[in-house]
Image (cartoon, rainbow, N blue to C red):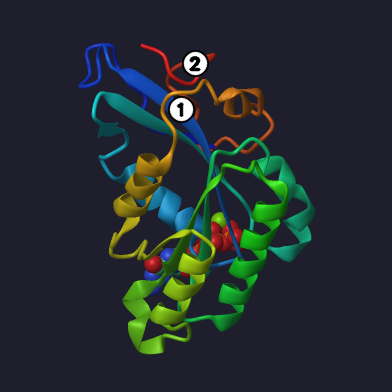
C-alpha cells in the first residue's frame, strides 16, 4: 500500500478539503500493475486538485498470480476505486480483466469507480487486443478506459486523474480505506497518520 500525496499544512492545499480514497489494482500477473504504481508514485504529481477539493489515494497493489485470487476480496473490500489492468499484447490478460470487472460488479462496493487500463501501449507492434473492442467493452460497462504505458508514462497520471474526477467528494465515505489499514502490503509507510474521515479541512 502506498499512501499517496501526503500533504503538508503549508503545501498547496493548505486550508482546502482533502478526500482520501482506497484504490486497488487488479489484473493478471505481469500486466504491469506494480510498474504503473511505481510510475505514478515516482511521478511528482500525487495530489489532485479539483476546485478546492484535493484527492489522496491509498493504493493497494495486488499479486496477479491465480493462486492469490482468493485474497483479492480483502483488497477490494471497502475500495472506492479500482484499476483493472491488462496487457495489450496478451489477449488472455484482457479476458482475465473482464472477469475482474465482473467480480467487482458483483462483490465490491456498489459505487466503486472502475477504470480499465490497457497497459504496455508502447508495444503496439505486438498488439493482440484491439483498442476499439476494449473501448466498446468499457463503454458497455461504464468503465473509464485508457491505454497506458508504465514504460513511457503514457496516460499514467491521466488515468489516476480521471478516477479522482469521478469520485464523490462530499460524503464521509472513506471508513473502508482506513479500517483496512494494516492488513495489506505496505509499499511505503504513510508519512502522516491516516485521517479518521474522508473529507476534512
Ligand atoms: P504481478 O505482481 O505478478 O501480478 O505482476 P504485475 O502486474 O505487477 O507486473 P509488473 O509491474 O511486475 O511488470 C511485469 C513486466 O512487464 C516487467 O518486466 C515490467 O518491466 C514489464 N512492464 C510493465 N509495464 C510495462 C509497459 O508499460 N511497457 C513495457 N514494455 N513493459 C512493461
Ligand atoms: Mg506486481
Nearer to me, 195 or 132: 132
Q: Is the N terminus in the top left, top right, bottom left or bottom right quadrant? A: top right
**Would you call the spot at circle 2 few (<14 residues within 10 Å), some (14-19), or many (20 or more)?**
some
Disc 1 to disc 2, C-alpha distance: 8 Å
The image shows residue 154, relative to residue 126, as above or below, that is above
Query: Considering the numbered disc 2 on the image, is that residue within a helix, a strand or a loop?
Result: loop
The image shows residue 19, relative to residue 157, as above or below, that is above
Nearer to me, 179 or 33: 179
Query: Considering the numbered disc 1 on the image, is that residue within a helix, a strand or a loop?
Result: strand
Q: Is the C terminus in the top left, top right, bottom left or bottom right quadrant? A: top left
**Residue located at (51% from left, 72% from top):** 137
**Residue located at (67% from left, 66% from top):** 99
Q: Position of residue 25 (x, y in %)?
A: 55, 51
Q: Is residue 175 left or right of residue 142?
A: right
Q: Position of residue 87 (x, y in %)?
A: 49, 73
Q: Position of residue 39 (x, y in %)?
A: 36, 52
Nearer to me, 184 or 161: 161
The image shows residue 130, relative to residue 30, as above or below, that is below
Q: Position of residue 154 (x, y in %)?
A: 28, 62
When asked about the image quadrant of residue 126, the answer is: bottom left
Instruction: Give the numbered dot on residue 20.
Output: 1
The image shows residue 131, relative to residue 47, as above or below, that is below
**Would you call the spot at circle 1 few (<14 residues within 10 Å), some (14-19), or many (20 or more)?**
many
Instruction: Give the numbered dot on residue 195.
Output: 2
| Residues at marks 1 and 2 touching, judged by CB atoms closer than 8 Å | yes
Q: Is residue 186 left or right of residue 21?
A: right
Q: Is residue 150 left or right of residue 101?
A: left
**Residue located at (42% from left, 72% from top):** 135
When asked about the image quadrant of residue 66, the answer is: bottom right
Amino acid at each position: 500500500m502506498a499512501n499517496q500525496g501526503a500533504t503538508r499544512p503549508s503545501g498547496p492545499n493548505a486550508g482546502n478539503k482533502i478526500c482520501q480514497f482506497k484504490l486497488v489494482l487488479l489484473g493478471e500477473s505481469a500486466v504491469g500493475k506494480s510498474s504503473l504504481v511505481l510510475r505514478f508514485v515516482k511521478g511528482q504529481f500525487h495530489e489532485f486538485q479539483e476546485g478546492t477539493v484535493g484527492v489522496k489515494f491509498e493504493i493497494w497493489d495486488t499479486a496477479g498470480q491465480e493462486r492469490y485470487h482468493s485474497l483479492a476480496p480483502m483488497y477490494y473490500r471497502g475500495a472506492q476505486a479500482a484499476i483493472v489492468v491488462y496487457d495489450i499484447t496478451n489477449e488472455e490478460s484482457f479476458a482475465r480483466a473482464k472477469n475482474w470487472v465482473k467480480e467487482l460488479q458483483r462483490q465490491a462496493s456498489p459505487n466503486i469507480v472502475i477504470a480499465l487500463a490497457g497497459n504496455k501501449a508502447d508495444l503496439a507492434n505486438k498488439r493482440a487486443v484491439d483498442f476499439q473492442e476494449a473501448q466498446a467493452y468499457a463503454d458497455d460497462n461504464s468503465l473509464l478506459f485508457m491505454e497506458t504505458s508504465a514504460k513511457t508514462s503514457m496516460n499514467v497520471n491521466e488515468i489516476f486523474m480521471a478516477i479522482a474526477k469521478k469520485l464523490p467528494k462530499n460524503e464521509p465515505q472513506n471508513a473502508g480505506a482506513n479500517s483496512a489499514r494494516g492488513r495489506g502490503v505496505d509499499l511505503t509507510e504513510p508519512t502522516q497518520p491516516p485521517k479518521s474521515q474522508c473529507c476534512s479541512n
